[in-house]
Amino acid sequence: MPDFNTESTPNPNSLKITTDAGPFIEEGLASFGSAEEAEGHPLGERLFSLAGVENLLVMPEFLTVTKGAGTEWDLLLPKVERVLEAHFDAASSSDE
């Protein structure tokens, strides 16, 4: 199971997440402001399926998740980490 590190950002509704499990995406960046914008992007779709996710910035070395004002990190973050665990488990399975 990968370890995830979180860092606060200037926006209290956003968290930066890093891991040593591998890149979040292979290259470039992906930015999504809605579930519709994330359609076709497997990680983006899975994260937007979580209630409270409002925005995503995905880069190879980190992911920033922005939540809605009425959502608590204590409830959302464990769900985000489960999605990320599945993402990295699937990526490592396809590498074998």
Image (cartoon, helix red, strand yellow):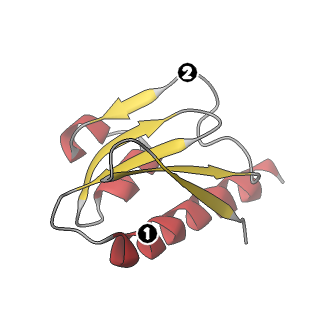
Q: Amino acid at mark 1?
A: Leu
Horizontal relation, residue 37 to residue 79: left or right:
left
Horizontal relation, residue 95 to residue 11: left or right:
right
Q: Amino acid at mark 2?
A: Gly
**Which residue occupies 21% across, 42% down?**
34
- The picture places residue 95, in percent across and down from the top left corner, at 79, 49
Q: Residues within 10 Å of mark 2 (few under 14, many from 20)?
A: few
How far apart are the two marked residues, 1 and 2, measured between alpha carbons? 24 Å
**Which residue occupies 73% across, 46% down?**
22
Question: Are dots 1 and 2 in contact, CB under 8 Å?
Answer: no
Asked whether 27 or 66 is in front, the reply is: 66
Q: Residues within 10 Å of mark 1 (few under 14, many from 20)?
A: some
**Which residue occupies 15% across, 67% down?**
70
Asked whether 37 or 18 is in front, the reply is: 18
- The picture places residue 57, in percent across and down from the top left corner, at 42, 36
- Give the residue furthest to the front: 10
71 lies above or below 57? below
Mark closest to the chain's N terminus, 1 or 2:
2
Q: Which residue is mark 2?
A: 28
- Residue at disc 1, secondary structure: helix
Q: Quarter of the image holding residue 39?
A: top left
Number of marks in the rendered image: 2
Disc number lying in front (1 or 2):
1
Q: Which residue is mark 1?
A: 77
- The picture places residue 78, in percent across and down from the top left corner, at 47, 75
Horizontal relation, residue 29 to residue 25: left or right:
left
State the mark number for residue 67: none
Horizontal relation, residue 67 to residue 26: left or right:
left
Q: Quarter of the image holding residue 4?
A: bottom right
